[in-house]
Amino acid sequence: MANEYLMLNEKSSDLGTIGLNKVVFETIASITVGEDTDVVLPDATPFYRPINCKIEKNVLKITVDIRLRNGKNVNEVTTRLQQKISDTILETTAFDVTAIDLKVVGFVF
């Protein structure tokens, strides 16, 4: 079974360990995607979430389903968004994401 949290040890200090729930990473990714004007997150339902985090052996993998605005270049937008999500998580949590998978599930006209 996958962990629900990730343990971060700060090497430069002896202050302790920080545990971050995967919901923290999902929220950061959601806010980052929401700031991008070229994509839209699909609506969540009780049985579907557009952003999913998986943590196994202190390795974080994020999957994001997005809807792309009509006329936008898929490669440019997804590459930029992957980098932006990775940078934001690194800046806010000091953790480097192992994989960010973006799936284009539709388009916005």
Image (tube, rainbow, N blue to C red):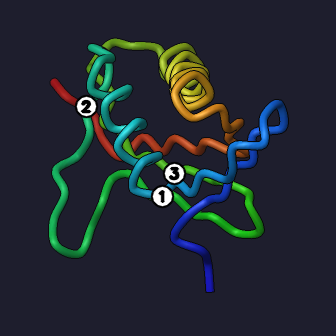
Where residue 35 sits in the image (x, y, percent)? 29, 18
Lower position in the chain sequence, tag 1 or tag 3: 1
Q: CA distance from mark 3 to mark 2?
A: 15 Å
Label 3 element class: strand
At 69% from the left and 50% from the top, the residue drawn is: 16
Which numbered tag is attached to residue 97?
Answer: none
Q: CA distance from mark 1 to mark 3?
A: 12 Å
Residue at label 1?
22
How many C-alpha atoms fall within 10 Å of the one at disc 2: few (<14), some, or many (≥20)?
Answer: some
- Whether residue 75 appears in this view of the structure is no
- Whether residue 67 appears in this view of the structure is yes
Label 1 element class: helix
For the residue marked with disc 1, what is the amino acid? Answer: Lys
Image quarter in which the C terminus is found: top left
For the residue marked with disc 2, what is the amino acid? Answer: Val
Residue at label 3?
63
Q: Residue furthest right?
A: 11
- Judge whether 85 appears above or below 55 on screen: above
Which numbered tag is attached to residue 40?
Answer: 2
Q: CA distance from mark 2 to mark 1?
A: 21 Å
Where residue 56 sits in the image (x, y, percent)? 70, 69
Lower position in the chain sequence, tag 3 or tag 2: 2
At 33% from the left and 53% from the top, the residue drawn is: 50
For the residue marked with disc 3, what is the amino acid? Answer: Thr
Where residue 82 sits in the image (x, y, percent)? 57, 28
Q: Quadrant of residue 32?
A: top left
The answer to whether 104 appears left or right of 106 in the picture is right
